[in-house]
Image (cartoon, rainbow, N blue to C red):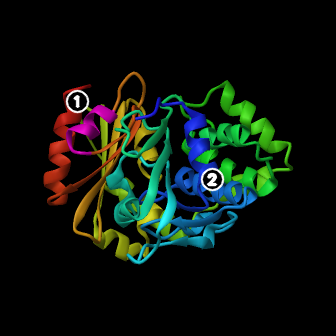
């Protein structure tokens, strides 16, 4: 495995490839899609043939992003590719059906910022200190000598702003704002983008939030907020899975709460967890117990079982740490 921050190793893979498959993770968020969309523009500027892949649809909220309509769900007949490049993917399982592209690529590489990443590609650039994966993309651009454009800036802003909680999470640092200054110099339409990402809410999402708030209970001596959403809740609100992505933050915002979880049923018959914590508490260690992963204060799990059974298991593990 290459040294974690070896930008030259990634740059060499890209320079030597002509056909590149760029892969995002399942349940895609702004950082994985922003990273992929930015890489498409960067690679095209270098004269490469690029195909974007994601196992699930792009959330409606990101339909303003350049390249949002160019993501493909693999059919099993793609390739071969000179290079498969995974972005913001914490492990190979997070690629879903896109993981099959590894076998149809001459070389595999990845760029990620999850500390739990095991280094699953031929070449791995993992920076657990980066506030967002798009921060890594911006640094790579300088190594590749690709100029920043407004479209690339929009994609990078999507990733950086969403993964830092609109610049409010503990991962936000001085370097985050130095890169933001560079993006602003490309006439980034900040007010318009910020409203689209953080202010305007689909009615279905607001209704789903109501269901989640109604379900909220507290465990761990009152320090852990617990929310549950069933498939019936989604149906009643006309909501999609993507509408639940940020709801767990409302639980963590409850006074005297140190940790929070949102558990929701999926149409695949599994239970998906979003875990959050306030420093110094962590949830990546909890997630790893159940095959999940992520960041110290924001992680995820997907489990088999009933909603109540799975919540009991995860809540018990969390309660032992507060």
In 3D space, how far apart are the residues under numbered discs 1 and 2 (Cα atoms)?
32 Å
Residue pointed to by mark 2: 198
Mark 2 element type: helix
| Count of marks overlaid on the render | 2
Disc nearer the start of the sequence (1/2): 2
Q: Which residues are magenta?
A: 283-291
Residue pointed to by mark 1: 221
Residue 63 place in picture, x, y as percent: 64, 68
Identity of the residue drawn at 63% across and 43% down: 137
Q: Quadrant of the N terminus?
A: top left
Identity of the residue drawn at 48% across and 31% down: 4
Q: Quadrant of the C terminus?
A: top left
Residues 280 and 1: in front is 1
Q: Specify whether residue 285 is painted magenta.
A: yes
Mark 1 element type: loop
Judged from this view, the residue extending furthest toward the top is: 280
Q: Residues within 10 Å of mark 2 (few under 14, many from 20)?
A: few
Q: Is residue 150 visible?
A: yes
């Amino acid at each position: 495995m290459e040294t974690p921050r070896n930008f030259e190793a990634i740059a060499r893979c890209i320079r030597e490839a002509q056909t590149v498959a760029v892969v995002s993770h399942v349940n895609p968020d702004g950082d994985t899609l922003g990273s992929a969309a930015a890489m498409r523009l960067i690679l095209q500027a270098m004269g490469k043939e690029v195909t974007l892949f994601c196992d699930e649809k792009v959330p409606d909220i990101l339909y303003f992003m350049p390249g949002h309509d160019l993501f493909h769900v693999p059919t099993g007949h793609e390739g071969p590719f000179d290079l498969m490049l995974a972005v913001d993917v914490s492990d190979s399982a997070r690629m879903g059906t896109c993981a099959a592209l590894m076998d149809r690529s001459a070389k595999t590489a990845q760029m990620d910022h999850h500390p739990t990443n095991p280094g699953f590609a031929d070449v791995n650039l993992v920076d657990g200190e980066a506030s967002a994966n798009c921060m890594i993309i911006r640094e790579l651009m300088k190594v590749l000598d690709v100029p920043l454009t407004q479209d690339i800036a929009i994609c990078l802003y999507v990733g950086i702003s969403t993964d830092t909680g609109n610049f409010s999470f503990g991962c936000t640092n001085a370097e985050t704002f130095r890169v933001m200054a560079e993006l602003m110099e490309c006439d980034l339409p900040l007010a318009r983008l910020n409203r689209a990402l953080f202010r305007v809410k689909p009615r279905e999402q607001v209704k789903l939030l109501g269901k989640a708030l109604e379900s909220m209970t507290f465990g761990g001596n009152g320090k852990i907020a617990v929310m549950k959403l069933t498939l019936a809740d989604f149906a009643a609100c006309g909501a999609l899975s993507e509408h639940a992505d940020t709801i767990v933050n409302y639980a963590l915002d409850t006074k005297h709460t140190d940790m929070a979880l949102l558990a929701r049923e999926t149409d695949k018959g599994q239970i998906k967890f979003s875990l959050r914590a306030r420093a110094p508490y962590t949830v990546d260690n909890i997630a790893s117990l159940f095959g999940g992963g992520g960041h110290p204060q924001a992680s995820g799990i997907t489990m088999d079982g009933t909603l109540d059974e799975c919540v009991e298991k995860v809540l018990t593990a969390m309660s032992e740490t507060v």
